[in-house]
Image: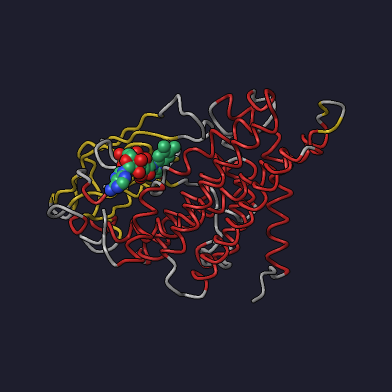
């Protein structure tokens, strides 16, 4: 077993690491306070090729393995999860899903725009009444001649107010997951409106939105995949998406450890740096072990994707462990910083607020446990 990265992967990781250190870390607090990351970041992410990782070159992508994508997600998560979300939703949940299920026309229409940063994507699954139980969503798409008319509401949609296209899951058939179909809906269509959700605990720089669709007309050629396969498409996107979330969490936990190590070395109490105290070292050791364990789970899941093996359970394990580890690391980092951890002059309070949501979205920790439990026992406890 060889756990070292290939030279090109190290180079990609270092490119992302240096860029994040220079262009993201210095602004993260300011964007958090302003409740918006600088929109120019999208162009920079595109220039670096980060919006095209894993997308074929013929569609403007930069190609590469799934592990390459995970490595970049760790670095973006280390800098600012709000920035990581722009990429992991546009590329991970929307572009890669179009690449997997789209027609040639859909790929040619959207993928080059995502890779160049011209268009941002959003993933519209959650509704006010259906979160974990997304298979029972109520947004409806009905036929109108050759077109479809979509009506319904989506909530907590990452990139919602920035997106040029929304991947919308709507009911076209009977109840339950088999009645759901996916559509690529341009957000400038008549009847499509959106409102940014303010006052979030964390991820304040990210545009999270409520979407309202009032008889939005889409052509049948804008349907993604066959009618009735939408839920399957959503779940397969989220399986891979969970690895990206997990990798972002590894970066966030690493950020907590790095900040805590630096602070513990400098901060003196009782005449000695606090790093010399065993109880402080215990917190640092816990953070280091959990961060490494989370990374190994992420790499294992990414490697399964790259080898074409089943990876869903490994993705759930990585997402569950890494998101909980990120919350714990952020909490411990605040403890290491003492009162200074409670103000945003230092990064750890933001890490805590940004970590907290990661145990909720793309399937809560409870949902990951049910998925793992089902794989272990063969019994669905949903
Ligand atoms: P609920 O499903 O109501 O869950 C509430 C609690 O009940 C949780 O603890 C849950 O674990 C528990 N629970 C529910 N069912 C069970 C069960 N069967 N057994 C045990 N426990 C259970 N959605 C999108 O579609 N696209 C996005 O881009 C997106 N971005 C988001 C960004 C942010 C900042 C946030 C906060 C959310 C985002 N979401 C997005 C929505 C997110 O995926 C949902 O919030 C999540 O799936 C949980 O759904 P819910 O909030 O309705 O909670």
Quarter of the figure with the N terminus: bottom right
Q: Nearer the viewer, residue 310 or 378?
A: 378
Q: Is residue 132 visible in this depiction of the protein?
A: no
Q: Nearer the viewer, residue 127 or 117?
A: 127
The answer to whether 57 is drawn above or below residue 244 in the figure is: below
Q: Nearer the viewer, residue 148 or 312?
A: 312
| Ligand 1 - quadrant of the structure image | top left
The answer to whether 317 is drawn above or below residue 40 in the figure is: below
- The quadrant where residue 110 appears: bottom left
Q: Residue at x 39, y 34 (%)?
A: 209
Q: Residue at x 77, y 34 (%)?
A: 263
* Extreme residue in the right direction: 271
Give the percent coordinates (x, y) of residue 5.
68, 68
- The quadrant where residue 275 appears: top right
Q: Is residue 92 left or right of residue 75?
A: left
The answer to whether 265 is drawn above or below residue 299 in the figure is: above
Q: Nearer the viewer, residue 11 or 351?
A: 351
Q: Residue at x 64, y 27 (%)?
A: 30
Q: Residue at x 64, y 42 (%)?
A: 79
Give the percent coordinates (x, y) of residue 134.
27, 48
Tell me which colouring the rendered structure shows.
secondary structure
Give the percent coordinates (x, y) of residue 201.
48, 29
Q: How many marks?
A: 0
- The quadrant where residue 130 appears: top left
Q: Is residue 281 left or right of residue 67?
A: right
Q: Is residue 319 visible in this depiction of the protein?
A: yes
Give the percent coordinates (x, y) of residue 157.
39, 39
The answer to whether 196 is drawn above or below residue 25 in the figure is: above
């Amino acid at each position: 077993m060889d756990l070292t990265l290939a030279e090109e992967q190290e180079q990609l990781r270092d490119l992302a690491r240096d860029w994040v250190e220079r262009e993201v870390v210095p602004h993260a607090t300011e964007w958090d306070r302003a409740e918006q990351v600088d929109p120019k970041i999208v162009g920079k992410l595109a220039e670096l090729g980060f919006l095209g990782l894993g997308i074929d070159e013929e569609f403007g992508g930069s190609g590469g393995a799934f592990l390459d994508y995970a490595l970049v997600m760790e670095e973006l998560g280390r800098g600012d999860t709000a920035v990581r979300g722009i990429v992991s939703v546009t590329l991970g949940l929307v572009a890669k899903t179009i690449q997997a299920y789209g027609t040639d026309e859909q790929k040619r229409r959207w993928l080059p725009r995502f890779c160049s940063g011209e268009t941002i994507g959003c993933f519209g699954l959650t509704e006010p009444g259906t979160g974990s139980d997304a298979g029972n969503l109520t947004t409806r798409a009905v036929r109108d001649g050759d077109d479809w008319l979509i009506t319904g509401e989506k909530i907590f949609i990452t990139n919602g107010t920035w997106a040029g296209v929304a991947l919308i899951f709507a009911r076209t058939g009977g109840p339950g997951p088999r009645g759901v179909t996916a559509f690529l809906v341009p957000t400038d269509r008549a009847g499509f409106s959106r409102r940014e959700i303010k006052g979030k605990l964390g991820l304040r720089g990210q545009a999270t939105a409520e979407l309202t669709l009032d008889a939005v007309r889409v052509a049948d050629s804008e349907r993604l995949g066959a009618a009735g396969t939408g839920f399957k498409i959503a779940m397969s996107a989220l399986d891979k998406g969970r690895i990206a979330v997990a990798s972002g969490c590894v970066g966030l936990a690493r950020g907590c450890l790095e900040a805590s190590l630096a602070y513990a070395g400098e901060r003196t109490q009782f005449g000695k740096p606090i790093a010399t105290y065993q109880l402080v070292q215990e917190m640092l050791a816990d953070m280091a072990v959990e961060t490494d364990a989370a990374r190994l789970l992420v790499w294992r899941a990414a490697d399964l994707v790259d080898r074409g093996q089943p990876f869903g359970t490994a993705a759930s394990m990585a997402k569950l462990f890494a998101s909980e580890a990120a919350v714990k690391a952020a909490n411990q980092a605040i403890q290491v910083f003492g009162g200074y951890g409670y103000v945003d002059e230092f990064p750890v309070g933001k890490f805590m607020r940004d970590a907290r949501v990661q145990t909720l979205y793309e399937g809560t920790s409870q949902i990951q446990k049910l998925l793992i439990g089902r794989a272990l026992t063969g019994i669905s406890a949903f």
